[in-house]
Image: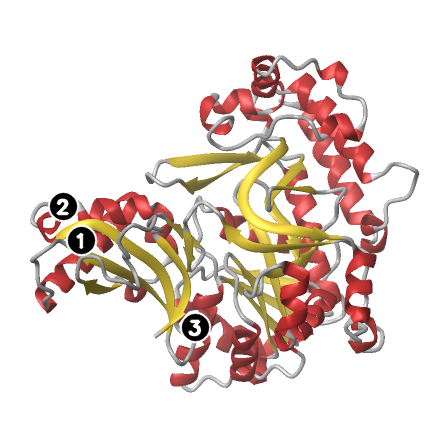
């Protein structure tokens, strides 16, 4: 028996169950988030064998890191230079994988899995993010709530992690009951129709395009979603406020700032931040004022905007990308996740909005709960992946599809991968492929290339196979001549991905 683990679990669970959310988000004492993350570094440097080796390789003495300024000079940790270079056991505290009680899996660009172990204490950190959403957005502390888990189940982090967090909230006293149909739409329809009437509201938790498709298909089957007071918890992809409005109309939402919540999370460390009524109010204002958004974010596209707890996940930025530090089954210090984005202190955000004549606190409903937590905005990965139904689609996977016999004789190997939207804002995986010189386009070639790409995605990318519904797996392929000026201009460095486009 692992007595120490039993003691650790009991202490963490007691603290979670007995500590009000307000106290979790407003820690008492003089300890700053900066001091807390320095303490995390020292804890990791003395207990995690892989990080000890990492520091030795960089000729760093942990004793030299005493201030936050010292901490900011530490080398960045990445999946390539750290996670993939060490045995899984060495990445855990004291080199003991058995100190964790569950393992999630994420697939990389080659389809090879990365394992992410965690313990109960790690889930309780993330359960606080769900508590923010369910209490402050959905009022689930006073409403009988059915939580329908629509993420893929199995080893994938989304489904099981989310289910466990909902159950921890129920243990804390929230009148929440979870059911787990996963991404089986007919089962989702069945549980909502048969169980929904027993609850005051139904929360669907899943990836944005899948939940939209679920709502649309339900409407076509005669389901009146509004009678169930539907709420959505979303993760995995950036979506527009137009998308939120459209989906809100179809599910009968009258208060989009209180009926939706998007989570910013990774398999590496769970949920890092979450939308709040305040952040959604701000984002909807910025969507209607693109000049303000460009001024704030430096780009014309609108990122995901969430609030985060720096005592749980400490963010930094470097060269326009995000770093975070946090305690997990695999503790991470200055971990570079290749997401482009930035940070905004709470007061700075309010001051900026005031300069544009907008006070989001006044725009919130009377009695709304909000906290002076900082904001993080996220455009997405900077490593040329695209996100589709929550699965990271890598150019390397598509390349293999174009390198198959016969097909490789038709193409140059260049392509553009993008997520496309039709007029109804349904998403499709689009691939524009450059034909080899003197090769003419045909429907037969188009069909064969699409099938080859789909086959290799299913073979190489386990997230794609598990997350993306079968009817959305076949890409829409467009063939162009060599040197097409829009997609493959001669003499210009080629980019294999492109931002979302309409079709």
- For this rendering, which residue is in front, 320 or 247? 320
The reply to whether the C-beta atoms of the residues labelled 2 and 1 are less than 8 Å apart is yes
Q: What's the mark number on residue 196?
A: none
- For this rendering, which residue is in front, 122 or 18? 122
Quickly name the residue at label 3. Answer: 214
Q: Tag 1, which secondary structure?
A: helix
Identity of the residue drawn at 29% across and 46% down: 397
User: Could you give the CA–CA distance between mark 3 and mark 2, rounded to whole angstroms?
Assistant: 35 Å
Outermost residue, right side: 29
User: Is tag 2's residue or tag 1's residue first in the polypeptide sequence?
Assistant: 2
Q: Position of residue 368 (x, y in %)?
A: 81, 71
Q: What's the mark number on residue 452?
A: 1
User: Could you give the CA–CA distance between mark 1 and mark 3, rounded to whole angstroms?
Assistant: 28 Å
Q: Is residue 468 left or right of residue 274?
A: left
Quickly name the residue at label 2. Answer: 404
Q: Quadrant of residue 52?
A: top right
């Amino acid at each position: 028996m692992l007595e120490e683990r039993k003691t650790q679990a009991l202490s963490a669970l007691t603290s979670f169950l007995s500590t009000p959310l307000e106290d979790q988000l407003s820690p008492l004492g003089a300890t700053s988030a900066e001091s807390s993350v320095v303490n995390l570094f020292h804890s990791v440097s003395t207990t995690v064998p892989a990080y000890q080796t990492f520091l030795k390789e960089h000729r760093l003495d942990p004793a030299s890191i005493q201030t936050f300024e010292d901490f900011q000079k530490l080398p960045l940790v990445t999946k390539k230079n750290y996670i993939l270079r060490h045995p899984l056991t060495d990445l855990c505290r004291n080199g003991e994988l058995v100190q964790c009680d569950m393992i999630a899996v994420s697939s990389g660009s080659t389809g090879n899995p990365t394992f992410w172990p965690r313990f109960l204490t790690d889930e309780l950190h993330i359960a606080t993010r769900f508590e923010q959403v369910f209490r402050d957005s959905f009022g689930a502390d006073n409403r009988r709530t059915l939580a329908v888990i629509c993420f893929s189940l199995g080893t994938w982090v989304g489904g099981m992690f989310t289910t466990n967090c909902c159950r921890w909230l129920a243990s804390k006293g929230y009148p929440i009951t979870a059911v787990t149909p996963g991404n089986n739409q007919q089962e989702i329809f069945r549980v909502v129709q048969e169980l929904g009437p027993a609850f005051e509201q139904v929360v669907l938790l899943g990836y944005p395009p899948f939940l939209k498709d679920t709502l649309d298909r339900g409407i076509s089957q005669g389901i009146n979603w509004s009678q169930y007071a539907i709420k959505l918890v979303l993760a995995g992809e950036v979506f527009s406020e137009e998308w939120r409005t459209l989906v809100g109309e179809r599910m009968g939402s009258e208060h989009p700032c209180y009926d939706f919540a998007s989570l910013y999370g990774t398999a590496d460390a769970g949920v890092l931040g979450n939308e709040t009524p305040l952040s959604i109010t701000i984002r909807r204002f910025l969507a209607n004022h693109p000049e303000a958004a460009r001024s704030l974010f430096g780009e014309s596209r609108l990122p995901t905007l969430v609030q985060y707890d720096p005592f749980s996940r400490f963010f930094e930025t470097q060269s326009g990308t995000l770093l975070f530090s946090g305690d997990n089954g695999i503790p991470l210090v200055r971990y570079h996740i290749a997401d482009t984005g930035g940070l905004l202190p709470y007061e700075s955000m309010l001051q900026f909005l005031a300069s544009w004549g907008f006070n989001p606190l006044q725009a919130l409903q009377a009695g709304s709960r909000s906290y002076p937590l900082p904001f993080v905005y996220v455009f997405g990965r900077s490593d040329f992946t695209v996100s589709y139904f929550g699965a990271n689609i890598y150019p390397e996977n598509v390349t293999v599809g174009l390198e198959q016999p016969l097909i490789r004789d038709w193409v140059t190997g260049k392509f553009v991968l993008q997520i496309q939207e039709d007029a109804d804002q349904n998403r499709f995986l689009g691939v524009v492929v450059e034909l080899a010189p003197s090769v003419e386009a045909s429907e037969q070639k188009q069909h064969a290339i699409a099938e080859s790409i789909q086959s290799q995605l299913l073979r190489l990318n386990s997230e794609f196979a598990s997350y993306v519904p079968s009817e959305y797996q076949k890409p829409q392929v467009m063939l162009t001549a060599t040197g097409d000026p829009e997609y493959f201009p001669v003499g210009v460095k080629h980019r294999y991905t492109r931002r979302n486009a309409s079709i």
